[in-house]
Amino acid sequence: MLRLGLVGCGAIAHTHTANIVNKLKGAQITFVFDVFSAAAQKIVRDYNLTAKIASSIDELVNSEEVDAVLVCSRNDAHVEPILAAIKAHKPVFSEKPLATTYEDCQKIVAAEIEENQRFLQVGFMRRYDPFYQQLKQTIDGGKIGKPLMGYCRHFTAEPATNYFETPNMINDAFIHEIDIIHWLFGDDYVSVQVQYARQNSLNKNDNLVDPQIATVKMKQGAIVNTYLTQNSQYGYDVKCQIIGEKGIAELPDMPKLEMHSVGKIYHEIDHDWTYRFEEAYQLEMQDFIDQATRHEAPTGPTAWDGLVAALTADNAVESQQSQQVVEIKLPERPVLYQ
Amino acid sequence: MLRLGLVGCGAIAHTHTANIVNKLKGAQITFVFDVFSAAAQKIVRDYNLTAKIASSIDELVNSEEVDAVLVCSRNDAHVEPILAAIKAHKPVFSEKPLATTYEDCQKIVAAEIEENQRFLQVGFMRRYDPFYQQLKQTIDGGKIGKPLMGYCRHFTAEPATNYFETPNMINDAFIHEIDIIHWLFGDDYVSVQVQYARQNSLNKNDNLVDPQIATVKMKQGAIVNTYLTQNSQYGYDVKCQIIGEKGIAELPDMPKLEMHSVGKIYHEIDHDWTYRFEEAYQLEMQDFIDQATRHEAPTGPTAWDGLVAALTADNAVESQQSQQVVEIKLPERPVLYQ
Amino acid sequence: MLRLGLVGCGAIAHTHTANIVNKLKGAQITFVFDVFSAAAQKIVRDYNLTAKIASSIDELVNSEEVDAVLVCSRNDAHVEPILAAIKAHKPVFSEKPLATTYEDCQKIVAAEIEENQRFLQVGFMRRYDPFYQQLKQTIDGGKIGKPLMGYCRHFTAEPATNYFETPNMINDAFIHEIDIIHWLFGDDYVSVQVQYARQNSLNKNDNLVDPQIATVKMKQGAIVNTYLTQNSQYGYDVKCQIIGEKGIAELPDMPKLEMHSVGKIYHEIDHDWTYRFEEAYQLEMQDFIDQATRHEAPTGPTAWDGLVAALTADNAVESQQSQQVVEIKLPERPVLYQ
Amino acid sequence: MLRLGLVGCGAIAHTHTANIVNKLKGAQITFVFDVFSAAAQKIVRDYNLTAKIASSIDELVNSEEVDAVLVCSRNDAHVEPILAAIKAHKPVFSEKPLATTYEDCQKIVAAEIEENQRFLQVGFMRRYDPFYQQLKQTIDGGKIGKPLMGYCRHFTAEPATNYFETPNMINDAFIHEIDIIHWLFGDDYVSVQVQYARQNSLNKNDNLVDPQIATVKMKQGAIVNTYLTQNSQYGYDVKCQIIGEKGIAELPDMPKLEMHSVGKIYHEIDHDWTYRFEEAYQLEMQDFIDQATRHEAPTGPTAWDGLVAALTADNAVESQQSQQVVEIKLPERPVLYQ
């Protein structure tokens, strides 16, 4: 039974904890920490955990009762527990984004290189989604030939919060495509551009430009457009269509009953992400648990993937200012991540 | 320009006349007849025809200004103009059903055999529908192996008229499947059974049992179930699914825009048959015109097909009484129709 | 942690054990029994169980280290451990069919009535499938009006074994529809008929009539046809289409990538049942574990459902002889199962 | 019977002539002209026309036996017969593109303005396609709210000719989207950009960059991306997806049998455009004939639409050089075309 230390006890910590307690195998949470101790107490109570409450990140990470660390704290507070875990040679799972600055990402990558070992898995759960997995296998298997272009939709029915503003369209929405597209294509980005389309009058947030179109280009020439809205009204709709030299492969709609009713042949589409990605959240965490239990380095998204995403997102937010193309100057990929 | 004599000037005559005038090539209506002369006058006026009004069927059929005959009169009045046309060696198109009694159908078949030539095309327009055509070719081409079973839906949103009663479900609806199924399977019926399913409380006609399920068996063992309702509420829905030894072939839905709206991914389904079968009505008549113009025997549904449908429908109506299986005693197929 | 005693250690026992060990929460197998002790030893070894091997069913069922019993033995050996568990007031999960004779089913029902309590859950896992669940809710919610008719396909690509013979089409395939259809319609069967369609020449088993069509009628008049083949060639295809007073609800295809390739727009269909129903197997067992842990009576398929299925299947096998309708004389539903 | 004079007797002239002779109503070709008289003689012979062969465009256009003019000559030879027809106040149908230079388009527009009347219909047949028609009505009817973004595919399985080079991707392929997109959105273009994606190694033409992505922006902010390839390999695939404030409307696939076979659920996609657009070619010409017969100005695509397309295409070809955004400086729309 893998003993997990949980840093940060907010919403996403509850999601992971619920899964660990109710769905996943082989792990228990033995230590929790939150800067607000009430939050730490609450999660212990809510899930009836037999866990201690740590008084510091250091205490938690270095405890002999902690085999691996989950980082679910605020985005700008990821770096401290991650660095501590790497130093302690303990497997660490961090929610995305890896950090809020490119510099912090570089520190984390440097820390792993220093130890010459990978400990970190970043929570880009889409890579564990069975349909993205099929897409990756289909591309890698050559079924559509080399991938040349892509078209993605990342639509939510309504903004997650009132505080969802223009840069959030990159940092909280497009960030998922940033991670998944270069993984699918097996290539690196050379540029990103964000353009504003005709604005949706049903968008009620003055600080949110909606919709936007983000375009990435890759070294081998592939171009992918991602259409982004937080106000689709009709539902949660994540699509990814990859066009190759001899065919197209595309994510399916989520299965629902096929209905004939009132002049329509239809199936329903969900309002939010739960049904679409709940399995991916479980699969990524089970994989982390299983690999940590076997003392293997995580094979999921790495610190380097986190750095790539952070840099690309920074450049995309920069592009939002001018709506012009921004070049992405990615350093050479370190040997540890090849 | 083929000169057509039109017998019977009711609703379906208007459909054919509108097509001949507005859509089809190579024919004009030069003579019309109706037992109600006002109906004859009306159709001439409505379509601005340069046609004479005949005072009898004989006058029309035998006129030197008539090359071929269209029979759109009441179902029980088809036999007279058809026999006259055969005797006059003129191509004749008759609306379905060929006649209202099996005996009349036998007379028509006998008349053609007497002349040792085929003159008649029966208006089973579905055989001209592009999708039934694809289905026939797919089966005959061996793509699904030998056809073993079938499942059909023949649904209308609401009854065509207040006078649509229990036997009409056979004579006006299932009659289409009767003709199309043995054609698709290339086989003859050995029995038919009609069963009443749980009744639809939204059906407001006390003289109509709705829904019904009609089952036909064929000599080589194939079984096809056709589900019949005049009260689907949701739309006009004709489906035909043929299950073969190694696959299934099925009619597509009619194409409509793919929509994402209000929590649904949908396309519309029509309320009535117009869009579904208007092309088939045009194609059957154009084929009749073209073959008559070339002095060729019609290759569409024959008098024999009309007789098979009449006998099978009679047996199906008989089955409605008991809901038991009724054996179909089809005579041997005459050489003329092989 | 619920302590389970496992009776019978064959193929389906391995499926459940793998799930309990790798996927499900809250249970461990503490005792196993098989008439072949090698099979018992093997399952302990294969899954590294910390379980004792019982020398008799009685020892296992009545052990203080067993909270609940899983019956995965041969179909004709279900009754003994089930009766023992009921007598011991322990929750018991039995694979379908409940028993191989109607008399044995009656004994089990009588035993629960004697104790005036339900202990048994029968392994009709389809009721836990999310799509059958949606179908049930859609019907019960009135979205399609009252259900009037149904059309099902139960197709496998090829026979599971060389020993799959004509009656197996009922007892091992149609048995699933028998259970699910009366549950979906909320009604009881009054008759069943099995007919043989045109035979598939690709079927290589002389003792297997393939395909067959099974028709059930229910008290309120609904009729459902199930098309059955073990030789679809193209894949594993389970469909269920329910036609109501104002609409149709139908199981979806399992989601797969949408592909454009080589002149086709397609998605794949699986060769076997694994992907289609693996989740249902997990959900039924988790539900059993959770309810047993809470000392609640199981709410899944009951002994009565098992008896209904056994009686209907017996009648269906009888119908195979004559291909005629066989009346189903179901006794009145005992109060315990209302 | 409308008497048509046909200028230019090449491939597209044969398409229109075949339709006029075999499918359409109310017109006959009475005069033909081609700079190669053999081509004129051939078309008369092939379709058994009772038509005279003109010795000059002027003779044909001004003949008393010509009521309306069809221009099917080489693209750079459209302007002469069009100007002659306008001067003669005769309805004129011209194949797209209207002309090969923006200046020629301006001359044609000026000629109509001079006569203060519209005579010309340009052969952008997609506007007559029933599905683009549905899309237009759906948008205009407000079903998806205001249109904000679009995604189009214009894919052919293989290049139409060996001479299909990089600029042809604009002038012969994208030209259709250029016309249809501003019509669908009811807006004017402000810029166009053409980018080259990763190149398809199966493209065997060194003078063809393939694939390309063309992006147009409109005054009200809408952005539409069109993915263009002449080497899809898998088939002819024209899609148009319009994303509005509250929903998406998208062209359907062309209907084909739904098949289950060899592990796939599929329908076929055609290899070329014939099935997709043959009806549109017929409908545009029938509309031209009907309006000319009624002495009404054509309501199809106008000279102004031809000019807009020519200017946008010129700018798109310019963008191919740099792959940068090119501003489109469209003059104000003349009153005649409002």
Image (cartoon, coloured by chain):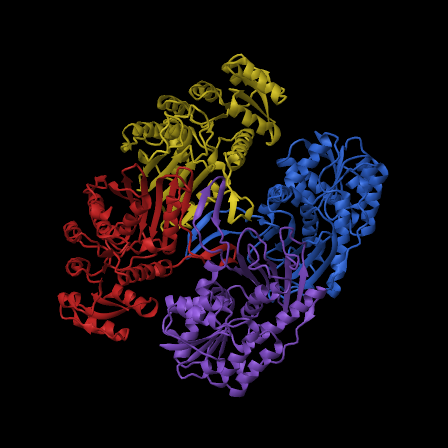
Chain colours: A yellow, B purple, C blue, D red
Pick the quarter of the image with the C terminus of chain B. bottom right
Where's residue A107, x and y in %? 38, 21
Vertical arrangement, residue A337 with respect to residue D17, above or below: above
Vertical arrangement, residue D136 with respect to residue B116, above or below: above
Residue D13 figure quarter: bottom left
Name the residue rendered at 44%, 68% in the picture. Answer: B42
Of residues A6 and D150, the one nearer the viewer is D150
Total number of numbered discs in the rendering: 0
Vertical arrangement, residue A250 with respect to residue B101, above or below: above
Left or right: where D84 falls relative to D200? left
The residue most toward the right is C114
Name the residue rendered at 35%, 29% in the picture. Answer: A209
Of residues D315 and B23, the one nearer the viewer is B23
Pick the quarter of the image with the N terminus of chain B. bottom left
Where's residue A182, x and y in %? 38, 37
Residue A284 visible here:
yes
Of residues C272 and D48, the one nearer the viewer is D48
Where's residue B140, x and y in %? 51, 69
Name the residue rendered at 54%, 59% in the picture. Answer: B239
Residue D24 figure quarter: bottom left
Residue C98 visible here:
no
The residue most toward the front is B38
Left or right: where C270 falls relative to A248? right
Where's residue A244, x and y in %? 37, 48
